[in-house]
């Protein structure tokens, strides 16, 4: 089992009716890279919001742990408990 730690930026844009639409997630090798990219997305105004999450996974087996939110910027969906 080859566990990996994934750092993912999940951007959101506003849909036609004002709802949030997820865009393709972007994976990074390090937490600082993901956090920096999220800040740049928000500063650039191209997204309504972005979540940065850390997730441990074994992609070969298709096993993914629950994501841990590292940063939530702008308009993002409510986190499920």
Image (cartoon, grey):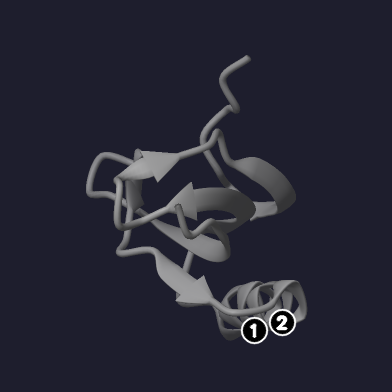
Task: Residue at 30%, 64% (x, y): give it.
Answer: 24
Task: Residue at 59%, 79% (x, y): give it.
Answer: 29
- Local SS, label 2: helix
Quarter holding residue 63 = top left
Between marks 2 and 1 in the image, the one whose residue lies nearer the viewer: 2
- Specify the farthest residue to the left: 16
- Residue 31 is tagged as none
Q: Which residue is mark 1?
A: 40
Task: Residue at 35%, 38% (x, y): give it.
Answer: 19
- Local SS, label 1: helix
Image coordinates for residue 53, horizontal then vertical, percent: 62, 53
Image coordinates for residue 58, horizontal then vertical, percent: 43, 52
In this view of the protein, which residue sits in the foreground, 79 or 42?
Answer: 79
Contact (CB < 8 A) between labels 2 and 1? Answer: yes
Q: Which residue is mark 2?
A: 36
- Specify the farthest residue to the front: 1
Quarter holding residue 67 = top right
Specify whether 16 is left or right of 39.
left
């Amino acid at each position: 089992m080859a566990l990996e730690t994934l750092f993912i930026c999940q951007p959101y844009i506003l849909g036609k009716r004002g709802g949030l639409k997820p865009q393709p997630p972007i994976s990074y090798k390090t937490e600082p890279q993901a956090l920096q990219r999220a800040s740049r997305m928000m500063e650039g105004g191209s997204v309504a919001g972005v979540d940065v999450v850390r997730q441990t996974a074994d992609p070969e087996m298709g096993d993914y742990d629950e994501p841990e939110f590292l940063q939530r910027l702008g308009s993002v969906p409510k986190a499920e408990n």
